[in-house]
Image: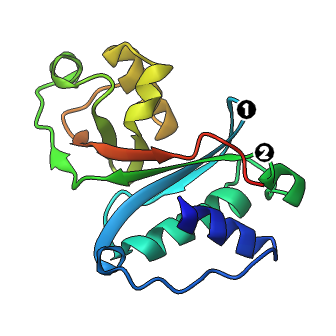
């Protein structure tokens, strides 16, 4: 959490990110950083596969969520005082071999599985937290296809699903 907050503060010119020497932060990791003001989403950016050290991934995704999420304007210093930060550390993705949508819906674990969908160069993911607003597996998959710019009620044998879990850390209170 400190890494994410410090990276955002640095992006606002409020402080510099301190050097961290913990060896576990140097191991490859995949994370998502989600920002909320009250209950409203304010930014969410992440990595589904580990391609850089965990600490670097958290800092980069925190800055991207705050300043580069195309759905929002860059976070302001005033918003930083009220923003809640959540860091999700992803497990490795595991293939979910399914015969169709009903099989996928039956095998998903609501509230547990994050899901990554790929089809003909398009992809999208939902963190396990999305189950809170989309608890029905069929609707969850429809919204995931929509996010990947596919028809919500579309299924093709070429759709590939992988699932992952997360360790979620949330500060629950604003900075300051």
Compared with 52, 129 (above or below) is above
Identify the residue under disc 1. 38
On the image, the x and y values in percent for residue 35 come to 64, 47
Of the pair 140 and 74, the residue shown nearer to us? 74
Residue extending farthest to the front is 176
Instruction: Name the mark on residue 82.
Output: 2
Mark positioned earlier in the residue sequence (2 or 1) = 1
Compared with 18, 89 (above or below) is above
Q: Residue at image x 41%, y 49%?
A: 122
Q: Residue at image x 36%, y 57%?
A: 48
Work out how far the residue at label 2 is from the one at label 1, CA to CA, in angstroms: 8 Å
Residue 151 seen in this snapshot: no
Compared with 51, 138 (above or below) is above
Mark 1 closeness class: few <14, some 14–19, many ≥20 residues within 10 Å: few
Residue 52 shown left or right of residue 5 in the figure: left
On the image, the x and y values in percent for residue 168 come to 41, 44
Q: Residue at image x 55%, y 71%?
A: 60
Residue 67 occupies quadrant: bottom right
Figure disc tally = 2
On the image, the x and y values in percent for residue 33 come to 53, 53
On the image, the x and y values in percent for residue 47 come to 42, 60
């Amino acid at each position: 959490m400190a890494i994410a907050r410090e990276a955002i503060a640095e992006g606002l010119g409020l402080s510099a990110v301190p050097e961290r020497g913990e060896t576990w932060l140097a191991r490859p990791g995949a994370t998502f950083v989600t920002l909320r003001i009250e209950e409203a989403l304010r930014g969410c950016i992440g990595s589904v596969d580990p391609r850089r050290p965990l600490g670097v991934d958290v800092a980069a995704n925190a800055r991207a969520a705050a300043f580069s999420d195309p759905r929002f304007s860059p976070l302001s210093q005033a918003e930083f005082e009220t923003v809640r930060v959540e860091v999700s550390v992803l497990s490795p993705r595991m293939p979910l071999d399914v015969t169709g949508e009903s099989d996928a819906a039956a095998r998903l674990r609501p509230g547990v599985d994050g899901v990554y969908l790929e089809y003909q160069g398009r992809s999208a993911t939902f963190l396990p937290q999305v189950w809170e607003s989309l608890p029905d597996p069929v609707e969850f998959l429809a919204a995931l296809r929509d996010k990947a710019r596919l028809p919500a009620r579309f299924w093709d044998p070429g759709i590939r699903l992988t699932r992952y879990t997360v360790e979620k850390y949330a500060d629950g209170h604003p900075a300051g």
